[in-house]
Amino acid sequence: MREAFDQWNYVVAAYAVTIAGTLLLVAWSWLAMRAAERRREQGRGR
Amino acid sequence: MHGFANPARFLRIARWLTPALVLSGLAVAALALAYGLFAAPAERLQGETVRILFVHVPTVWLGMAGWTTIAVASFVELVWRHPLAGIAARAAAVPGAAFTAMGLLTGSIWGRPAWGAWWVWDGRLTSFLVLLFLYFGYIGLADSIDREGGSSRIPAIFGLVGAVNIPIIHFSVTWWNSLHQPPSLTTSGSSMAPEFLWGLLAAALGFSLLFGGVVLARMRALLAGIQAEARLRRKALEA
């Protein structure tokens, strides 16, 4: 029982690293894209 | 293929393809990870830790796929001078490095219960760590050329030379003695039980769709930056 609980700690840690890393990467890339395209459109308007 | 090198045509396609890839990737990856966590069976020898397979293998694949994208785009940039090829190579670098780092971390977390060690200096792990350093080198080189000026062919050549490491990573488990298991999926078939194989393929598909969406988003950001800078230069010349 104790061993099974320890195994789940490793599983949860691996999933947390991957989910957090992927969501951060997606959010950062998406926001950077929106900001860059907004700057381009503002430049066109001037 | 040459038609897609036109930035205006690329943007027309990327505007709908970017959110489509991100949203479908999130949905498929979420379903595959839920299957890996809650529905996949424990394995006879590895117990519950076998579930790490569903996050470790896709991140490692995408770490290698990221550099393969850099190498192919660099080749196209050097040979055909496509304007978007260099942008595609640069856009793949950060996501490739991120997935390589995640592959190393999840592998290390898996290694502790499976091998009794967080890290061993064997061929597979060391060559994959080298891949992360190659990404750092490429990103630093491309950024310094942007800032200081210089030929964009330098990072392209670096991207092509660095591709030598990809077959080394792939064959490392057959060339050298390794704690790491040999490939379970090859062109001749799979040695994996179906309850793991289909979940793994779904996770790989979900993360690949996300990877594609992130690369497109970063290409759009780079392209917008280049276009804004070009407009500023034009205005400065006219003034």
Image (cartoon, coloured by chain):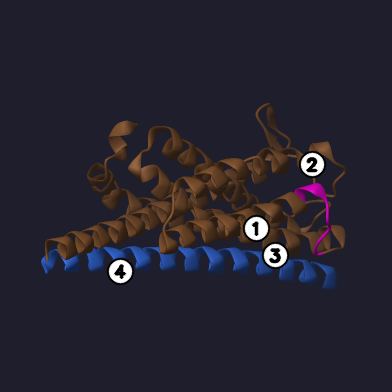
Chain colours: A blue, B brown
Mark before the other along the chain sequence, 1 or 2: 1
Which residue is disc 4 drawn over? Answer: A35
Front residue (pair B152, B49): B152
Magenta segment range?
B118-124
Q: Mark 3 is on which residue type?
A: Val
Q: Picture coordinates of residue B5 (x, y %)?
A: 31, 39
Q: Residues within 10 Å of mark 2 (few under 14, many from 20)?
A: some
Task: Read off the residue under disc 3.
Answer: A11
**Image location (x, y in percent) of residue A6:** 79, 71
* Residue occupying image coordinates x 80% and y 55%: B46
Residue drawn at x 12%, y 61% is B238
Q: What residue appears at the point 73 percent right and 67 percent down from the top-left corner?
A: A10
Residue where numbered disc 2 is placed: B173
Say which residue label 1 marks: B133
Kind of residue indicated by mark 1: Phe
In this rendering, is residue B164 above or below B42? above
Question: In terms of depth relative to the viewer, which is nearer, B231 or B34?
Answer: B231
- Residue type, numbered disc 2: Val
Q: Is residue B37 visible?
A: no
User: In what element is the residue under mark 4?
Assistant: helix
Q: Is residue B187 above or below residue B221?
A: above
Which residue is depicted at the point 36% across and 39% down? Answer: B82
x then y, percent, for residue A31: 36, 68
Quadrant containing the N terminus of chain B is top left
Q: Earlier in the sequence, mark 3 or mark 4?
A: 3
Residue at mark 3 shares a chain with residue at mark 1: no
Q: Nearer the viewer, mark 1 or mark 2?
A: 1
